[in-house]
Amino acid sequence: MSKCAACGRDAPEKKKYCRHHEQALGRLQEHYSVWVRAYGSGDNISWQDYLRRLSDMTQEQQAGEWVKEVIRAEMKKEKESV
Ligand SMILES: [Zn+2]
């Protein structure tokens, strides 16, 4: 049994996140691809740049807790792998 990287709950086998965080990540990735297209033309925004900007934004906005937790987990993962 896997554990969710964001909340430590049981996650489906071979999945990084539980059902809720998986869903939140899916929404983030969709939004990210929209962003990349919108900001496109040469100004490449990496997944980590996007997460950083988003986490600044979510400080002020009422983003869902699931989304915030996924952002934190994704940013933490990057720090650990550097
Ligand atoms: Zn979770």
Image: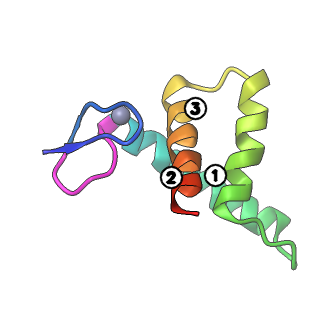
Is residue 75 toward the left or the right of residue 13 in the image?
Answer: right
- Residue type highlighted by circle 3: Lys
Measuring 70% from the left and 65% from the top, which residue is drawn there?
A: 46
What number is the disc on residue 68?
3
Question: Does the magenta run of residues contain 1?
Answer: no
Please give the range of residues in magenta.
12-19
Q: How is the image coloured?
A: rainbow
Where residue 82 sits: x, y (%)?
A: 59, 63
Single out the residue that lies furthest toward the bottom: 42
Measuring 81% from the left and 63% from the top, which residue is drawn there?
A: 38
Q: On the image, which quarter does residue 36 sit in? A: bottom right
Please state, as top left, top right, bottom left or bottom right, where the N terminus lies in the image. top left
Measuring 27% from the left and 53% from the top, which residue is drawn there?
A: 15
Q: CA distance from mark 3 to mark 2?
A: 14 Å
Q: What residue is shown with label 2?
A: 77
Q: Are marks 3 and 2 in contact (CB under 8 Å)?
A: no
Can residue 47 be spotted in the picture? yes
What number is the disc on residue 13?
none
Mark 2 or mark 1, earlier in chain: 1
Question: Is the residue 79 above or below the residue 60 in the image?
Answer: below
Total numbered badges shown on the rendered structure: 3
Question: Is the residue 61 above or below the residue 6 in the image?
Answer: above
Label 1 crowd (10 A; few <14 / some 14-19 / many >=20): few
Q: Choose mark 2 or mark 1, whichever is in front.
A: 2
Q: What residue is shown with label 1?
A: 31
Is residue 67 toward the left or the right of residue 51 in the image?
Answer: left
Q: Is mark 3 within 8 Å of ligand 1?
A: no
Question: Does the magenta run of residues contain 16?
Answer: yes
